[in-house]
Image (tube, helix red, strand yellow):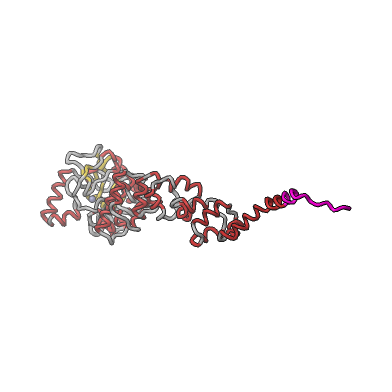
Amino acid sequence: MKKRKLKPWVVIAGILMVLILSLDRIEVFIKENTIPNYRELNKIGYNDDQIEIINEHGLEELSEILVEEYQEDIVEILTVPHYATLKGIGYSKTDLETILLADESILAKLEGYAFLNQWKTYLAEPMYRLILDTGYSEAAADVLLGLSDETIKDIVSHGYDAKYEGLVTSELTILGDLPTYLTYWKKVPSATLRVVQERVNTETDRSYYTGITASETSKGNLILVNKYFNLSSQFVPSALTTITVCGKAVMTKEAALALSMMCQAMIADGLHPKVTSSYRSYATQNTLYNRYVANDGKAEADTYSARPGHSEHQTGLAVDIITSTSSLSTFKNTKEYQWLMENAEDYGFILRYAESKQTITGYISEPWHWRYVGIETAKDFNTKNMTFDEYYRIYLQ
Ligand SMILES: [Zn+2]
């Protein structure tokens, strides 16, 4: 058979076909041989555009992010300011779409933090930023953000110390008073958190008988009268009632009834309680205090006697109890005192001036002085191990 010669155009067409079919392969071949790491990057999943940008940015410094696994947002990582750092901190790609809209200065600061759970608040609230930028944790910032801008500024003006965290998050802290706690803590750096709270909560961060406020008489059985809260010379409790179960006692009707029941219970237990003092008018207290001052001097008198208007006895809610055979100074060693320590709360009475709280109350230990507050409060108070002065500020005011 005669061999047919291929026509030239068919040959050319064939060559062209082969060329066209291999162009892609050739292109890849070229890239593999001109772009560093092309084959590896392509294998992980980067497309040519991405590889081009990766290449533009140089591979060496990026090798950790790149070679390990495919990053779909590699272009953002390489080209958008702050993106890589913030992503490294833990923000997701979706988070970053919002975060990166923030001001440059905010982004720069955000880079200084570990992942913030409340980054949205950080972006939106200047006060939250201020608190965090001062050093407080997110937990503390949550609490502080509830305060007025003015108070927050005052708080951060005191700077930051790790011990402030506990102060901010403690339930015994009155938040509005935070600047006062901080001021006191700076003045007395060795004080423990509890002492700082105790001092400020009872106002004993300043001298006794300074910054005096009128007692809230509307509080009834829960009224606070101390060296910072006083009663006017006109104040006389309503419905004063006299009982004589354990000596003569004059108290408000409710307190007198409670005392009467308490004394009866003590007597039934074979004890001999004896009331030595109960309601005292402003005038009586005035006479008493002045006599003590004349005898012992003002400084000493102040440790055991209240100035007129500052005595709990004027409320008609306080009673001094001893026994027929003991004095004030020996009462602490009696069974009657022991009984009161165990049972007085059942009748609504609390020990007001404990030995361990002298620096707060400003009075020497008075085992004989019992204050009526009502049964529920007395029982709750006894679980707290604090002075009534502090209890009042935290739970009753
Ligand atoms: Zn008393």
How many marks the image carries: the answer is 0
Nearer to me, 169 or 347: 169
Q: Which residue lies furthest to the left in this view?
A: 294
- Numbered range of the magenta stretch: 1-14
What's the residue at 17%, 41% (across, down)? 233
Name the side, left or right, on which 49 lies relative to 292: right
Q: Where is residue 62 in the image (x, y as percent from the top left)?
A: 50, 59
Query: Percent x, y for residue 140?
Result: 38, 51
Q: Where is residue 164 in the image (x, y as percent from the top left)?
A: 33, 55
Q: Examine the rendered structure and indicate whether residue 16 appears above or below residue 333.
A: above
Q: Is residue 326 above or below residue 226?
A: below
Residue 21 counted in the magenta span: no
Please report the residue visible at 22 percent of the width from the left and 45 percent of the height from the top.
229
Side (left or right) of 117 relative to 270: right
Residue 229 vs residue 18, the one in the foreground: 18
Residue 12 in magenta?
A: yes
Tell me where residue 276 appears, x and y as whole percent: 22, 50
Who is closer to the viewer here, 162 or 209? 162
Q: In this view, does 262 lie above or below 331?
A: above
The one nearer the camera, 282 or 385, is: 385
- Specify the farthest residue to the right: 1
The answer to whether any part of residue 162 appears in the image is: yes
Report the residue at 31% width, 59% height from top: 192
Instruction: Mark yes or no: residue 382 visible.
Output: no
Q: Quadrant of the C terminus?
A: top left
